[in-house]
Amino acid sequence: MLIATPPSPLVKQQCGVGLIEVMVAVLVLGIGMLGLLNLQNSTLQLNQQAYAYSQATNLAWDLMERMTANEDVADSYLTDFGTSVSSATDCSTQACTAEQLAAWDLNLWLDDLKKSLPQADAQISRSGATREYLISIRVDIERDGDGDLEQVDVGFRL
């Protein structure tokens, strides 16, 4: 026959302690998860910024190669920020002069720039009497539309 004994005073003091330990563990886990989410968000933003810089650099190199291939009229590629270029001649279907090819190249390149990097703008300039050119691309790196643009510059000599 078993006889029930009253609980000791020590057991009465332990009531609810396990629940508090679980609540503290859940709180620590929750704080850790918030930290991981913040880290993931930062990683995505930095990845997006790196992508925009890479795209701008690749596009600048593309234009540099186009200018090098048509270097006799490289000054025809010069343009300023906010300038739109239209080419009446489609050089993919008909023969073009060097100047027409430069206008067509620049028009295609600016279209590629707008497609790859929304809100991007470009300037192609020449440094004095030398044949040194600078391709400057302004990009909304964070893609938040606040007008805060970063500039990527690629310089080269023909």
Image: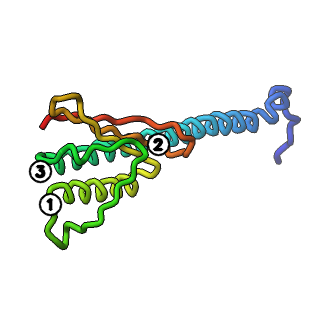
Q: Quadrant of residue 125?
A: top left
Q: Amino acid at mark 1?
A: Thr
Q: Where residue 153 sits in the image (x, y, percent)? A: 31, 34
Residues 147 and 123: in front is: 123
The residue that appears at 40% across and 40% down in the rendered structure is 138
Decide which of tag 1 and tag 2 comes sooner along the chain.
1
Identify the residue at image location x=86%, y=37%.
5
Q: Work out how far the residue at label 1 is from the one at label 2, CA to CA, in angstroms.
A: 35 Å
Q: Quadrant of residue 99?
A: bottom left
68 with respect to 35 (left or right): left
Q: Amino acid at mark 3?
A: Ala
In space, the residues marked 1 and 3 are separated at their CA atoms by 13 Å
Q: Residue at x 60, y 38 (%)?
A: 34
Classify mark 2: helix, strand or loop.
loop
Colour logic: rainbow
The label nearer to you, 3 versus 2, is 3
Label 3 residue SS: helix
Q: Is residue 62 above or below residue 42?
A: below
Reading the image, the residue beneath label 1 is 97
Quarter containing the C terminus: top left
Residue behind mark 2: 140
Q: Nearer the viewer, residue 29 or 158?
A: 158
Q: Residues within 10 Å of mark 1 (few under 14, many from 20)?
A: few
**What whole-number distance in Å separates the C-alpha atoms at marks 3 and 2?**
30 Å
Q: Position of residue 17 (x, y in %)?
A: 76, 32
Q: Quadrant for residue 14, please give it.
A: top right
Residue at numbered disc 3 = 69
